[in-house]
Amino acid sequence: MKILRPTVLALVCGLLLATANRQMHGVIDDNRRLHEERVFYGMVDGADLVATPAGWEISRQGQLIGYLKETTTPRGYNGDITLLVAYSTEGIILGVRVSHHRETPGIGDIIETGVSDWIHGFKETGFEGTGAESTQEIDAVSGATITTRAVIQAVAETVQP
Amino acid sequence: MNARTITRDGLWRNNPALVQLLGLCPLLAVSGSFATSLGLGLATLFVLTAANLVISLLRSQLDEETRLPVQILVIATFVTLADLSLQYWFFELHQRIGLFVALIVTNCTLLGRAEAFASRNPVAAAVLDGIMMGLGFLLVLLVMGSVREILGRGTLFAGLDRLTGLPDVSMTFADSGFLLMILPPGAFLTLGCLIALKNLVDGTNDGEAR
């Protein structure tokens, strides 16, 4: 019965991992939520967020002031770029963050907040007709043209009425 | 095998990254900055030591036919534990290196040490071998991470505070760096230079010995 000992060992390992997962998944889920919330609340300046099927509603003192939506564009230089876009009910952008991307480190990662301030340039812009500077007018970055254009396009489409 | 030989093998003479050239995937992919290098190096050190310990304990119970699958099973168990622990204590760091933590299981250094050393040696020697091989790998990762971060980004220890919860000790030398060093070619160039440097040092030593 050569197979007996490995089988017992596999059962022990499985049990160990199941126990560890059971003990840890609560905190891990909290960590994930905290991480997301830190990103979210940083974008909306401490306003309240209520989850809805289409994303989140941003409200301050019970009053609806805008929406937060997640959007994914396939037009990145290296696959999908996932963005979080917060904008007011008038269509003015409150903030944009990249939540997932696989752009080239050192070039395309200019869209990350830790790397450059470029993404903050979206703040206070909007689609035409809102009176604010047009989102489409944000400058792409030479060297990272495809990446930055993809982000600009995706943000503009998200806030489009 | 005495402790001195094991230590010297792991850290220098048989270094997993510079001599055995095992585990190149994480070595090249994660060594873009000091902080990520430290995270993955420590995770590998933990898994290597723990797996060596358990495999050495089990060595009299295992026969030729089932030894390899059992070794993989033990390694995979510890990798999963390391993955869970990182998400538990260092979630931000896990966001950055999570993909490569799961890939530790395919790091040939681990199976190599389990098969070549831990399954034939007593527990104390196997644990020491795990620690020293892990440290050897960690040190090379740290050197590569530092060199690539300094040359490629003009910073050192950037993000260490955010990723690990340690105090912020980041330094900035320049606003921008030599981009190539951050990209994959920079990893190969740095590793090549390190191997050449090691061979140069070894060559000189041999000459003196003779």
Image (cartoon, coloured by chain):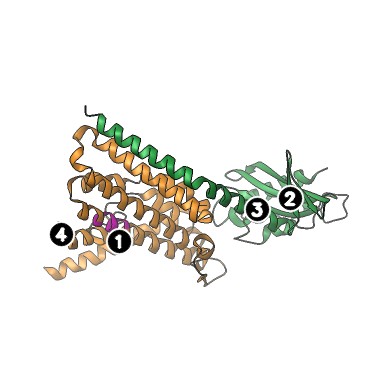
Chain colours: A green, B orange
Alpha-carbon span between mark 4 and mark 1:
28 Å
Q: Are marks 4 and 3 in contact (CB under 8 Å)?
A: no
Q: Is residue B174 visible?
A: yes
Q: Are marks 3 and 1 in contact (CB under 8 Å)?
A: no
**Residue A116, percent across and down?**
63, 61
- Judge the density around disc 1: few (<14), some (14-19), many (≥20) Cα neighbours within 10 Å: few
Q: What residue is pinned by disc 4?
A: B2
User: Which residue is the site of mark 3?
Assistant: A37
Residue sitting at 83 percent across and 42 percent down?
A: A161
Out of A117 and B206, give the one closest to the viewer: A117
Q: Which residue is mark 1?
A: B196
> Which amino acid type corresponds to the residue marked 2 in the rendered image?
Leu
Instruction: Count the labels in the image.
Output: 4
Q: Residues within 10 Å of mark 2 (few under 14, many from 20)?
A: many
Q: Residue at x 68, y 59 (%)?
A: A118
Residue B124 shown left or right of residue A74 in the figure: left
